[in-house]
Image: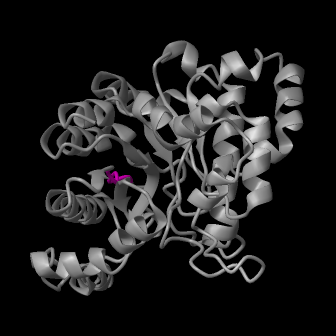
Amino acid sequence: MIIDCHGHYTTAPEPHQKFREAQLVRIKDSTLPAALPARISDDEIRESIETNQLRLQRERGADLTLFSPRASAMGHHVGNESVSTAWTRACNDLVKRVVDLYPQNFVGVCQLPQSPGVPIAHSVQELMRCVQDLGFVGCNLNPDPSGGHWNSPPLTDRHWYPFYEAMVELDVPAMIHVSASCNPNFHATGAHYINADTTAFMQFIQGDLFRDFPTLRFIIPHGGGAVPYHWGRYRGLADMLERPPLDTHVMRNVFFDTCVYHQPGIDLLVNVIDIDNILFGSEMLGAVRGIDPETGHYFDDTRRYIDSLAVPAEDKRRIFELNARRVFPRLDALLKAKGL
Protein backbone atom coordinates (compact mmCIF):
# COMPACT_ATOMS: atom_id res chain seq x y z
CA MET A 1 0.00 0.00 0.00
CA ILE A 2 1.15 3.54 -0.78
CA ILE A 3 0.00 6.12 1.77
CA ASP A 4 0.47 9.80 0.93
CA CYS A 5 0.72 11.58 4.29
CA HIS A 6 0.46 15.09 2.84
CA GLY A 7 -2.60 16.08 0.81
CA HIS A 8 -4.73 19.23 0.85
CA TYR A 9 -8.17 20.04 -0.56
CA THR A 10 -6.79 22.72 -2.85
CA THR A 11 -9.63 22.23 -5.34
CA ALA A 12 -12.63 22.78 -3.05
CA PRO A 13 -15.75 23.93 -4.93
CA GLU A 14 -16.06 27.65 -5.63
CA PRO A 15 -19.00 28.24 -3.23
CA HIS A 16 -16.68 27.34 -0.34
CA GLN A 17 -14.32 30.15 -1.32
CA LYS A 18 -17.30 32.50 -1.72
CA PHE A 19 -18.10 31.85 1.94
CA ARG A 20 -14.57 32.84 2.86
CA GLU A 21 -14.81 35.99 0.76
CA ALA A 22 -18.06 36.91 2.51
CA GLN A 23 -16.30 36.45 5.85
CA LEU A 24 -13.52 38.80 4.77
CA VAL A 25 -15.96 41.45 3.60
CA ARG A 26 -17.77 41.34 6.93
CA ILE A 27 -14.49 41.87 8.78
CA LYS A 28 -14.37 45.28 7.10
CA ASP A 29 -18.08 46.01 7.62
CA SER A 30 -19.54 44.46 10.77
CA THR A 31 -23.03 45.76 9.89
CA LEU A 32 -23.31 43.04 7.25
CA PRO A 33 -25.01 39.76 8.20
CA ALA A 34 -22.77 36.93 9.33
CA ALA A 35 -21.49 34.77 6.48
CA LEU A 36 -22.87 31.24 6.36
CA PRO A 37 -21.06 28.13 5.11
CA ALA A 38 -21.87 27.33 1.51
CA ARG A 39 -24.36 24.73 0.42
CA ILE A 40 -22.32 22.34 -1.67
CA SER A 41 -23.76 19.26 -3.34
CA ASP A 42 -22.15 15.84 -3.40
CA ASP A 43 -21.85 16.16 -7.17
CA GLU A 44 -19.82 19.37 -6.81
CA ILE A 45 -17.48 17.59 -4.43
CA ARG A 46 -17.19 14.59 -6.75
CA GLU A 47 -16.31 16.81 -9.69
CA SER A 48 -13.66 18.67 -7.69
CA ILE A 49 -12.05 15.43 -6.50
CA GLU A 50 -12.43 13.04 -9.42
CA THR A 51 -10.90 15.44 -11.93
CA ASN A 52 -8.04 16.38 -9.63
CA GLN A 53 -6.73 14.53 -6.56
CA LEU A 54 -8.42 11.20 -7.25
CA ARG A 55 -7.37 11.21 -10.91
CA LEU A 56 -3.75 11.90 -10.03
CA GLN A 57 -3.81 9.44 -7.14
CA ARG A 58 -4.81 6.71 -9.58
CA GLU A 59 -2.48 7.81 -12.38
CA ARG A 60 0.54 7.98 -10.08
CA GLY A 61 -0.17 4.77 -8.24
CA ALA A 62 -0.98 5.90 -4.71
CA ASP A 63 -3.66 4.17 -2.66
CA LEU A 64 -4.62 6.50 0.17
CA THR A 65 -4.13 10.20 0.94
CA LEU A 66 -4.22 11.83 4.36
CA PHE A 67 -6.35 14.81 3.39
CA SER A 68 -6.62 18.18 5.11
CA PRO A 69 -7.96 21.62 4.20
CA ARG A 70 -5.86 23.86 1.97
CA ALA A 71 -2.98 25.02 4.16
CA SER A 72 -2.38 28.37 2.48
CA ALA A 73 -6.05 29.22 3.02
CA MET A 74 -6.14 28.50 6.77
CA GLY A 75 -5.46 32.21 7.23
CA HIS A 76 -5.09 32.20 10.98
CA HIS A 77 -3.89 35.81 10.89
CA VAL A 78 -7.18 36.98 9.35
CA GLY A 79 -9.99 38.34 11.49
CA ASN A 80 -10.54 37.15 15.05
CA GLU A 81 -11.10 33.88 16.87
CA SER A 82 -14.77 33.61 15.91
CA VAL A 83 -13.94 34.11 12.23
CA SER A 84 -11.21 31.49 12.38
CA THR A 85 -13.45 29.02 14.22
CA ALA A 86 -16.28 29.31 11.68
CA TRP A 87 -13.90 28.97 8.75
CA THR A 88 -12.07 26.02 10.31
CA ARG A 89 -15.24 24.08 11.03
CA ALA A 90 -16.49 24.62 7.49
CA CYS A 91 -13.15 23.45 6.04
CA ASN A 92 -13.00 20.34 8.23
CA ASP A 93 -16.63 19.46 7.56
CA LEU A 94 -15.96 19.66 3.83
CA VAL A 95 -12.97 17.32 4.13
CA LYS A 96 -15.18 14.92 6.08
CA ARG A 97 -17.63 14.87 3.19
CA VAL A 98 -14.79 13.97 0.81
CA VAL A 99 -13.77 11.12 3.10
CA ASP A 100 -17.35 9.86 3.33
CA LEU A 101 -17.67 9.86 -0.46
CA TYR A 102 -14.29 8.18 -1.01
CA PRO A 103 -13.47 6.20 2.14
CA GLN A 104 -11.04 3.94 0.29
CA ASN A 105 -9.00 6.87 -1.00
CA PHE A 106 -8.94 9.58 1.67
CA VAL A 107 -8.63 9.89 5.47
CA GLY A 108 -9.12 13.19 7.26
CA VAL A 109 -6.53 15.41 8.94
CA CYS A 110 -7.86 18.59 10.50
CA GLN A 111 -7.19 22.29 10.38
CA LEU A 112 -7.20 24.11 13.72
CA PRO A 113 -8.95 27.39 14.64
CA GLN A 114 -5.78 29.14 15.73
CA SER A 115 -5.69 32.92 16.04
CA PRO A 116 -2.91 35.34 17.09
CA GLY A 117 -2.90 36.02 20.80
CA VAL A 118 -5.50 33.33 21.54
CA PRO A 119 -4.48 30.44 23.84
CA ILE A 120 -3.84 27.25 21.90
CA ALA A 121 -6.07 25.49 24.42
CA HIS A 122 -9.00 27.01 22.50
CA SER A 123 -8.11 24.69 19.59
CA VAL A 124 -8.49 21.52 21.64
CA GLN A 125 -12.26 21.33 21.19
CA GLU A 126 -12.00 21.26 17.39
CA LEU A 127 -9.26 18.63 17.55
CA MET A 128 -11.46 16.47 19.78
CA ARG A 129 -14.46 16.94 17.47
CA CYS A 130 -12.52 16.02 14.37
CA VAL A 131 -10.83 12.96 15.87
CA GLN A 132 -13.65 11.59 18.00
CA ASP A 133 -16.68 12.58 15.91
CA LEU A 134 -15.36 12.84 12.35
CA GLY A 135 -12.79 10.03 12.50
CA PHE A 136 -9.75 12.14 11.57
CA VAL A 137 -6.31 10.74 12.37
CA GLY A 138 -4.15 13.85 12.83
CA CYS A 139 -3.97 17.62 12.61
CA ASN A 140 -2.00 20.47 11.06
CA LEU A 141 -0.45 22.74 13.69
CA ASN A 142 0.62 26.26 12.70
CA PRO A 143 3.67 27.47 14.69
CA ASP A 144 3.09 31.01 13.38
CA PRO A 145 -0.57 32.11 13.39
CA SER A 146 0.59 35.68 12.72
CA GLY A 147 1.26 34.86 9.07
CA GLY A 148 4.96 35.51 8.86
CA HIS A 149 5.76 37.74 11.84
CA TRP A 150 6.63 34.91 14.26
CA ASN A 151 5.36 36.45 17.49
CA SER A 152 4.14 33.19 19.07
CA PRO A 153 6.25 31.37 21.69
CA PRO A 154 8.50 28.54 20.42
CA LEU A 155 6.83 25.15 20.05
CA THR A 156 8.71 23.97 23.13
CA ASP A 157 7.13 26.66 25.34
CA ARG A 158 4.49 25.69 27.89
CA HIS A 159 2.07 27.89 25.93
CA TRP A 160 1.51 24.86 23.69
CA TYR A 161 1.25 22.23 26.41
CA PRO A 162 -2.57 22.10 26.72
CA PHE A 163 -2.75 21.15 23.07
CA TYR A 164 0.03 18.60 23.36
CA GLU A 165 -1.79 17.00 26.26
CA ALA A 166 -4.82 16.53 24.02
CA MET A 167 -2.66 15.09 21.23
CA VAL A 168 -1.20 12.55 23.64
CA GLU A 169 -4.63 11.66 25.00
CA LEU A 170 -5.99 11.10 21.48
CA ASP A 171 -2.74 9.51 20.26
CA VAL A 172 -2.57 11.66 17.12
CA PRO A 173 0.42 13.38 15.50
CA ALA A 174 0.59 16.91 14.15
CA MET A 175 2.09 18.08 10.91
CA ILE A 176 3.88 21.38 11.42
CA HIS A 177 2.33 23.55 8.71
CA VAL A 178 2.14 27.33 8.43
CA SER A 179 -0.46 29.10 6.32
CA ALA A 180 -0.22 32.12 4.02
CA SER A 181 2.39 34.80 4.58
CA CYS A 182 1.27 38.40 5.01
CA ASN A 183 4.90 39.51 5.34
CA PRO A 184 6.17 40.61 1.89
CA ASN A 185 9.67 39.48 2.79
CA PHE A 186 8.56 35.84 2.74
CA HIS A 187 7.08 34.18 -0.31
CA ALA A 188 4.55 31.74 1.13
CA THR A 189 5.66 28.43 -0.35
CA GLY A 190 9.20 29.33 -1.41
CA ALA A 191 10.35 30.92 1.84
CA HIS A 192 7.72 30.95 4.61
CA TYR A 193 6.98 27.20 4.45
CA ILE A 194 10.62 26.11 4.34
CA ASN A 195 11.55 28.62 7.04
CA ALA A 196 8.82 27.26 9.30
CA ASP A 197 9.98 23.67 8.81
CA THR A 198 13.56 24.58 9.64
CA THR A 199 12.61 26.85 12.54
CA ALA A 200 10.45 24.19 14.16
CA PHE A 201 13.30 21.69 14.06
CA MET A 202 15.70 24.14 15.69
CA GLN A 203 13.15 24.90 18.40
CA PHE A 204 12.94 21.18 19.18
CA ILE A 205 16.73 21.05 19.52
CA GLN A 206 16.80 23.99 21.93
CA GLY A 207 14.02 22.71 24.20
CA ASP A 208 13.22 19.60 26.19
CA LEU A 209 9.70 19.03 24.89
CA PHE A 210 10.04 15.29 24.40
CA ARG A 211 11.24 14.78 27.95
CA ASP A 212 7.83 16.07 29.06
CA PHE A 213 5.92 14.35 26.22
CA PRO A 214 7.86 11.22 25.20
CA THR A 215 5.05 9.93 22.92
CA LEU A 216 4.36 13.21 21.12
CA ARG A 217 4.90 12.99 17.34
CA PHE A 218 5.40 15.65 14.69
CA ILE A 219 5.78 15.47 10.93
CA ILE A 220 7.89 18.28 9.49
CA PRO A 221 6.84 18.55 5.83
CA HIS A 222 8.65 19.51 2.64
CA GLY A 223 11.46 17.10 3.43
CA GLY A 224 12.24 18.83 6.72
CA GLY A 225 12.98 22.19 5.12
CA ALA A 226 16.71 22.93 5.17
CA VAL A 227 17.45 20.41 7.92
CA PRO A 228 18.72 17.37 5.97
CA TYR A 229 20.92 19.55 3.77
CA HIS A 230 22.49 21.13 6.87
CA TRP A 231 22.45 18.04 9.09
CA GLY A 232 26.02 18.63 10.25
CA ARG A 233 25.11 22.16 11.33
CA TYR A 234 22.27 20.91 13.53
CA ARG A 235 24.31 18.09 15.00
CA GLY A 236 27.05 20.60 15.74
CA LEU A 237 24.65 23.14 17.25
CA ALA A 238 23.14 20.46 19.47
CA ASP A 239 26.65 19.70 20.73
CA MET A 240 27.50 23.39 21.24
CA LEU A 241 24.24 23.97 23.11
CA GLU A 242 24.95 20.91 25.27
CA ARG A 243 21.87 19.13 23.98
CA PRO A 244 21.79 15.34 23.69
CA PRO A 245 22.52 13.75 20.30
CA LEU A 246 19.75 14.35 17.77
CA ASP A 247 18.85 10.69 17.40
CA THR A 248 17.73 10.51 21.04
CA HIS A 249 16.80 14.15 21.68
CA VAL A 250 14.59 14.81 18.65
CA MET A 251 14.39 12.03 16.09
CA ARG A 252 12.38 9.60 18.18
CA ASN A 253 9.51 12.04 17.88
CA VAL A 254 10.03 13.97 14.62
CA PHE A 255 9.51 12.71 11.08
CA PHE A 256 9.99 14.21 7.60
CA ASP A 257 7.88 13.72 4.49
CA THR A 258 9.07 13.35 0.89
CA CYS A 259 7.61 16.57 -0.56
CA VAL A 260 10.96 17.28 -2.18
CA TYR A 261 10.60 17.83 -5.88
CA HIS A 262 13.76 16.47 -7.48
CA GLN A 263 15.65 13.18 -7.35
CA PRO A 264 18.91 14.51 -5.85
CA GLY A 265 16.91 16.02 -2.97
CA ILE A 266 15.22 12.72 -2.20
CA ASP A 267 18.53 10.89 -2.51
CA LEU A 268 20.07 13.25 0.04
CA LEU A 269 17.08 12.95 2.37
CA VAL A 270 17.37 9.17 2.46
CA ASN A 271 21.16 9.24 2.78
CA VAL A 272 21.05 11.59 5.77
CA ILE A 273 17.83 10.77 7.63
CA ASP A 274 17.01 7.32 8.98
CA ILE A 275 14.46 5.48 6.84
CA ASP A 276 12.19 5.05 9.87
CA ASN A 277 11.82 8.84 10.08
CA ILE A 278 10.63 9.34 6.48
CA LEU A 279 7.00 9.25 5.37
CA PHE A 280 5.87 9.34 1.76
CA GLY A 281 4.15 12.58 0.82
CA SER A 282 3.45 14.50 -2.37
CA GLU A 283 1.32 17.58 -1.56
CA MET A 284 0.16 17.15 -5.13
CA LEU A 285 -1.94 19.94 -6.55
CA GLY A 286 -0.24 22.08 -3.98
CA ALA A 287 2.74 24.41 -4.01
CA VAL A 288 4.48 23.14 -7.16
CA ARG A 289 2.16 21.93 -9.91
CA GLY A 290 4.17 22.24 -13.12
CA ILE A 291 6.18 19.85 -15.26
CA ASP A 292 9.93 19.68 -14.75
CA PRO A 293 11.44 20.57 -18.14
CA GLU A 294 14.50 18.48 -17.31
CA THR A 295 12.55 15.26 -16.82
CA GLY A 296 9.20 15.80 -18.54
CA HIS A 297 7.40 14.69 -15.37
CA TYR A 298 5.43 16.66 -12.82
CA PHE A 299 7.58 17.99 -10.00
CA ASP A 300 5.11 16.70 -7.38
CA ASP A 301 4.96 13.14 -8.75
CA THR A 302 7.08 12.06 -5.82
CA ARG A 303 6.45 8.32 -6.09
CA ARG A 304 8.86 8.28 -9.02
CA TYR A 305 11.67 9.50 -6.79
CA ILE A 306 11.10 6.79 -4.19
CA ASP A 307 10.83 4.10 -6.85
CA SER A 308 14.23 5.20 -8.18
CA LEU A 309 16.02 5.00 -4.83
CA ALA A 310 18.87 2.50 -4.58
CA VAL A 311 17.53 0.96 -1.37
CA PRO A 312 15.98 -2.44 -0.59
CA ALA A 313 12.29 -2.97 -1.36
CA GLU A 314 11.53 -3.30 2.35
CA ASP A 315 12.95 0.18 2.96
CA LYS A 316 10.69 1.56 0.25
CA ARG A 317 7.74 -0.15 1.90
CA ARG A 318 8.61 1.55 5.18
CA ILE A 319 8.58 4.93 3.43
CA PHE A 320 5.43 4.21 1.45
CA GLU A 321 3.32 2.56 4.17
CA LEU A 322 4.73 1.20 7.40
CA ASN A 323 6.10 4.43 8.85
CA ALA A 324 2.79 6.24 8.30
CA ARG A 325 0.90 3.44 10.05
CA ARG A 326 3.27 3.71 13.01
CA VAL A 327 3.15 7.51 13.25
CA PHE A 328 -0.64 7.60 12.79
CA PRO A 329 -1.96 4.81 15.06
CA ARG A 330 -5.58 5.71 14.35
CA LEU A 331 -4.90 5.25 10.65
CA ASP A 332 -3.38 1.86 11.32
CA ALA A 333 -6.43 0.83 13.36
CA LEU A 334 -8.76 2.03 10.62
CA LEU A 335 -6.88 0.07 7.96
CA LYS A 336 -6.75 -3.06 10.10
CA ALA A 337 -10.51 -2.81 10.61
CA LYS A 338 -10.80 -2.97 6.81
CA GLY A 339 -8.52 -5.99 6.66
CA LEU A 340 -5.60 -4.01 5.22
Q: Position of residue 14 (x, y in %)?
A: 27, 86
Residue 113 lies in the magenta stretch: yes
Foreground of the two, 336 or 121 = 336
Q: Residue at x 23, y 46 (%)?
A: 126
Image check: 292 left or right of 109? Answer: right
**Residue 226 visible in rendering:** no
Q: Is residue 66 above or below residue 271?
A: below
Q: Position of residue 15 (x, y in %)?
A: 21, 85
**Residue 302 visible in rendering:** yes
Q: Residue at x 68, y 81 (%)?
A: 296
**Snapshot quadrant of residue 263:** bottom right
Which part of the image, by quadrant, shows the C terminus?
Answer: top left
Q: Residue at x 28, y 76 (%)?
A: 50
Q: Is residue 187 above or below residue 277?
A: below
Q: Is residue 81 above or below residue 244?
A: below
Residue 303 lies in the magenta stretch: no
Q: Position of residue 288 (x, y in %)?
A: 60, 74
Residue range highlighted in magenta: 110-114
Which part of the image, by quadrant, shows the N terminus?
Answer: top left
Q: Position of residue 56 (x, y in %)?
A: 42, 71
Image check: 279 left or right of 130? Answer: right
State the predominant SS element of the stretch in magenta. loop
Foreground of the two, 153 or 246 = 246
Foreground of the two, 14 or 286 = 286
